[in-house]
Amino acid sequence: MNTVDYDKALYYTHRSQWDNLLILMVRTKDDLLSKKIEHFLHAYNFEHDYQVIEHKLYALLRYIDHALEQANVEEPMIILT
């Protein structure tokens, strides 16, 4: 699993780079990541209730965290002897 998309999503979200996040949404091969980004950006631009925006942001961040944890589990451990 390539973790670059998740790292980029986290960075762009932290730096409020919404244009780059939108580009990542279109280019990523992870459909769930794309959908989470889409829901967050839609809420950020059109929702007036801050709690909804916060909920979508946390959903995106939880998914990124989950995906990165799964990537670390799947990577084979290298043992040097």
Image (cartoon, grey):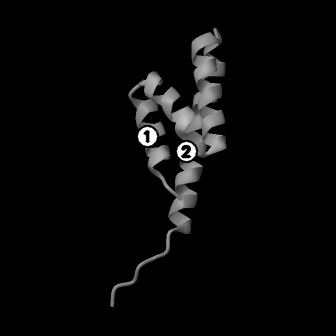
Dot 2 or dot 1, earlier in sequence: 1
SS under mark 1 = helix
Where in the figure is residue 24, as x and y percent of width and height? 50, 35
Where in the figure is residue 1, as x and y percent of width and height? 54, 59
Quadrant placement of the C terminus: bottom left
Q: Name the residue under label 1.
A: 8
Quick check: can you spot residue 59? no
- Determine the residue positioned at 38% across, 28% down: 15
The amino acid at mark 2 is Ile
Quick check: can you spot residue 9? yes
Q: Please identify the residue farthest to the left as the structure is shown.
A: 81
User: Looking at the image, how many numbered discs can be counted on the residues?
Assistant: 2
The amino acid at mark 1 is Lys
Where in the figure is residue 65, as x and y percent of width and height? 54, 48
Q: Mark 2 points at which residue?
A: 64
Image height check: is 40 above or below 34? Answer: above
Where in the figure is residue 72, as x and y percent of width and height? 50, 63
61 or 33: nearer the eye? 33
Location of residue 70 by image quarter: bottom right
- Determine the residue positioned at 41% across, 36% down: 11
| Residue 9 left/right relative to 56 | left
Q: How crowded is mark 1: few (under 14 residues within 10 Å), some or many (20 or more)?
A: some
SS under mark 2 = helix
| Residue 20 left/right relative to 37 | left
